[in-house]
Image: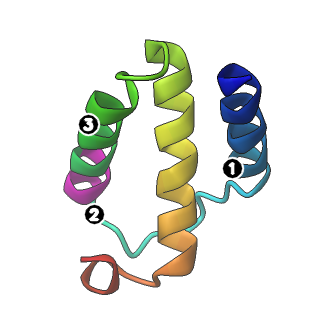
Amino acid sequence: MKKIGISFLLSIIFISCNNTNNEFSNVFKDNFKRECIKNAKVNLSTSKAESYCNCVLGIVMTKYGSESEAN
């Protein structure tokens, strides 16, 4: 049941992906993804953690217009 819930959550997040914002430096994006993947791998495989974190980064960049707003 837990795997179904995680899969459902990941599906919703994947649908919401949008990585078009350029107000974020590569350093910010790399650090965000590295820390996210490290934490997500506790419950997900490496490939799923990478996909999840790429998507979450897109959501963060969409919600917050710039790096300073996200911090």
Mark 3 vs mark 2: give the one in front. 3
Asked whether 12 falls inside the magenta stretch, the response is no
User: Label 1: which residue?
Assistant: 13
Residue 9 against residue 60 in the figure, above or below = above
68 and 26: which is toward the camera: 68
Residue 58 is left or right of residue 70, and the answer is right
Q: Residue at x 46, y 81 (%)?
A: 64
Labels 3 and 2: the sequence-earlier one: 2
Residue 65 circle label? none
Residue 51 is left or right of residue 53, and the answer is right
The 10 Å Cα crowd at callout 3, few under 14, some 14 to 19, many 20 or more, is: some
Q: Secondary structure at mark 3?
A: helix
User: Label 3: which residue?
Assistant: 34
Q: Residue at x 51, y 16 (%)?
A: 47
Q: Amino acid at mark 3?
A: Arg
Where in the figure is residue 33, as x and y percent of width and height? 34, 42
Q: Amino acid at mark 1?
A: Ile
